[in-house]
Image: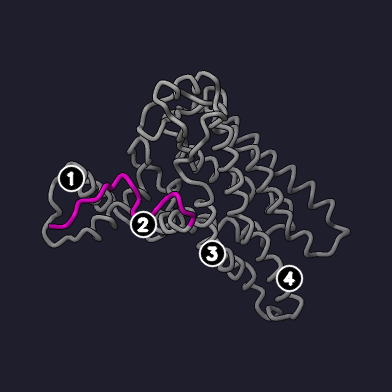
Amino acid sequence: MTERVNLDVPRWDQTQYWGRVKYFFTTTNPLNIFKSNSELEKCKEIVNSYKKGDRIPDGWTLDDVYKAKDVVDSAYHPETGDKMIIFGRMSAQVPMNMLITGCMVTFYKTTPAVIFWQWFNQSFNALVNYTNRSGTSPMPLDQVAKSYVLATSGALVTALGLNKLVKRLPTVAGRFVPFAAVAAANFINIPLMRIKELENGIEVYDENKNLLGESKSAARQGISAVVLSRVLMSAPGMVITPVLMEAIERRGLLRNMKWAPAPLQIAFCGVFLTFATPMCCALYPQVSPVSIDKLEPELQKSAEKFNSKIGYYNKGL
């Protein structure tokens, strides 16, 4: 009889970076966005049945159950279990960001194009942040709207302002403006979208799942980690692609193919994002450890009751 496994724990060691990378390669698999609702429900039913102790269906193997779990992880919120909006799912990250990033680094010279693609990018980011928010921290729609407006404004001010400043610099400098705008917007958007976590804290548990309390310190650490990983995630496509395109155009390789720059840059961004997305999501453990002595005094007292040395919190995505 096949030994039963705990499906609540990823099959790869999440305390190790490459274990997390393997996990996110499966959850960010773009092919999962093509799963129909019936396929998603079937996978969820299989996973839930297995967790309850039911036997694996005839014709299925443990590897099939794991694959079903990968599909569930890519489409359902890890805390609430709710099906996520399709464009906010992790499986939509690569194709959506490939299109948006490719267009931002292609159409960066004219003001209307900058405004449209920065607005489009921040609209998508707002959807992703809302979809992947911490399940224990409700997010009022007015806060979503405020974050969206401020992040979009920050991105536009950065992009339009830098476009004016770089006009006297080498042409390649202008190609990096979209990345600067995206980075600036991330520092605005993510903290604002999760302001309730910063104000009220997020739940911290010990190694035995005992609730120690809500910590603002853990919230700050988690949100800082998310901001950094998002910026680094966009960096390869938005920094290396402009360098490659500058070299290609200097050599005149696209002189007779005026249509080629946009699809070529989108393709470059797609290649970089395929690897950068899971590798940057994996920089920090999803359930992150925090030393008890770095938490608030009330949580430290709570930890003493359980003789806990390490706390754990879900940093979100």
Q: Residue at x 46, y 57 (%)?
A: 21
C-alpha distance separating marks 3 and 2: 16 Å
Instruction: Answer with mark 3 or mark 2, whichever residue precedes in sequence.
Output: 2
Q: Residue at x 38, y 41 (%)?
A: 77
Give the foreground label among 4 and 1: 1
Identify the amino acid type marked 3: Gly
Image coordinates for residue 206, horizontal then vertical, percent? 41, 31
C-alpha distance separating marks 2 and 4: 34 Å
Span shown in magenta: 1-17
Whether tag 2 and tag 1 are in contact, CB under 8 A, the answer is no
Q: Is residue 183 left or right of residue 144?
A: right
Image coordinates for residue 239, horizontal then vertical, percent? 68, 61
Q: Is 66 inside the magenta-drawn segment? A: no
Q: Is residue 122 left or right of residue 310?
A: right
Q: Which label is found at residue 270?
A: 3
Q: Which label is found at residue 49?
A: 1
Identify the amino acid type marked 4: Glu
Image coordinates for residue 125, horizontal then vertical, percent? 55, 44
Q: Nearer the viewer, residue 301 or 76?
A: 301
In this figure, which residue is indicated by the disc labeled 2? 32
Instruction: Answer with mark 2 or mark 1, whichever residue precedes in sequence.
Output: 2
Quarter of the image with the N terminus is bottom left
Q: Is residue 95 left or right of residue 26?
A: right
Residue 70: which quarter of the image?
A: bottom left
Instruction: Answer with mark 1 or mark 3, whichever residue precedes in sequence.
Output: 1
On the question of residue 165 being in view, the answer is yes
Helix, strand or loop at disc 3? helix
C-alpha distance separating marks 2 and 1: 21 Å
Identify the amino acid type marked 2: Asn
In this figure, which residue is indicated by the disc labeled 4? 246
